[in-house]
Image (cartoon, rainbow, N blue to C red):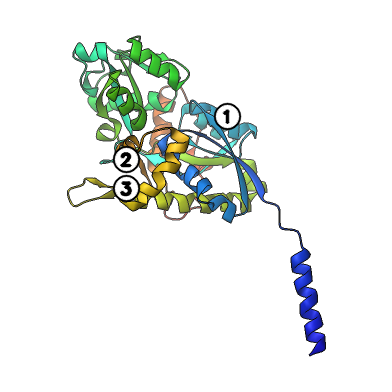
Amino acid sequence: MIHRLVALTFSLAMLMGAPAQAAEKITIAALTFVSSSPLFIAQEKGYYADEGLEVEFQFFRAAQPVAVAIASGDADFGVTAFTAGFYNLAAKGAVKVIGAQSREEPGYDFVAYLASNKAYADGFDSPAKFPGRSLGMTQKGSSFHLMIGMLADKQGFALDEVRLVPLEKVPNMIGAVKSGQVDAIMLPAHIALALQDGGAARVIGWVHEQTPYQLGGLFTSSRNIAERRPVVEKFVRAYQRAASDYADAFMQLDAKGNRQFGAEAEALIPIIAKYTKATPEKIKRGAPYIDPKGRLKVGSIYEQVAWLKGQKLVVPEADPAQFIDLSFIQGHMDVP
């Protein structure tokens, strides 16, 4: 009995004296859009900490720099829209898609088509009327470029009937449409609705009404997968927990297809507002569809790459089968 007490006392002393395991530090690159909400929820609700991760955020004003940050090693994980630049980096083996961000899903307003007040007064009141108009966007090959290309295909007009104006950053796009330098831009709902409410521009439609697609993804570097797979798995688990919380709060529909918001949404809105600076009403009105498990619509990525290749914006060797890693999340959809 004495020997057992001594052994137990020794064991407790060792446990109490053992230093806590240091948290694994990671950097996440993203935009401060509502579509990045699972990242913010995971941070504020302690899901990263539960996995032994210490997070630092890097925020950008356009999608392409997010991909570059991952490829260069300046950040470990990225969540943002797919772009031609992303696919070109992926073709070089620099980055891997491991999960989903938001997607344009019928019934869930996210990216809006916005017309300037001048263009709207001149009859530009529908996405079908883009021919002969100008569109401000961050850069060629951006998600905005892809979205106008998909719209052109659906509506049956030639893309070169729209004058594309690269403006580098979202704030520049906003300034250009407010001043009437461009006829239109596309922006997430929480920004688009604020511009409309302020009398600066007019919403003339929503992308999900025209061309539903997998807008964004969750990605990391090939090196992280090869050398830090346990860290990637921890990050994915935290992200999935937060995505599930988001879905419970913002993706509930009633029998008529109207969105419903209850106590879960009220609890998460302050977290999202902290990072996006959006009002509660704008968050509710424009919260995009995010798969609760982070699952991709894989076929959409194949279609995007094919379209961008056709525009000579993505290199011929880009192959989604090589840069999409489906092993971290189960149940991805529309897998070729």
Q: What element carries label 1?
A: helix
State how many labels appear.
3
Looking at the picture, tell me which residue is in the foreground, 312 or 229: 229
Pair 3/2: label in front: 2
Residue occupying the point 48% across, 18% down: 168
Q: How crowded is mark 1: few (under 14 residues within 10 Å), some or many (20 or more)?
A: some
In the picture shown, does residue 317 fall above or below 234? above
The amino acid sitting under disc 3 is Met
Residue 260, image x and y in percent?
26, 48
Report the residue at 78% width, 77% height from top.
9
Foreground mark, 1 or 3, reads 3
Q: Is residue 284 above or below residue 24?
A: above
Q: Which of 156 and 213 is in front in this view?
A: 213
Please tell me which residue lies in front, 32 or 73: 32
Horizontal side of residue 134 vs 121, given as left or right? right
Q: What element carries label 3?
A: loop
Q: Is residue 292 left or right of residue 232?
A: left
Q: In which quarter of the image is the N terminus?
A: bottom right
Q: Residue 251 carries which label?
A: 3
- Mark 1 = which residue? 68
Whole-angstrom CA distance, mark 3 to mark 2, is 10 Å
Looking at the rendered structure, the kind of residue marked 1 is Val
- The amino acid pointed to by label 2 is Lys
Q: Can residue 202 be seen? A: yes
Tag 2 residue: 284
Instruction: Indicate the secondary structure of the residue bearing disc 2.
Output: helix
The residues tagged by marks 1 and 3 sit, at their Cα atoms, a distance apart of 31 Å
List x then y, in percent, for residue 194.
Answer: 33, 26
Residue 14 percent coordinates (x, y): 78, 69
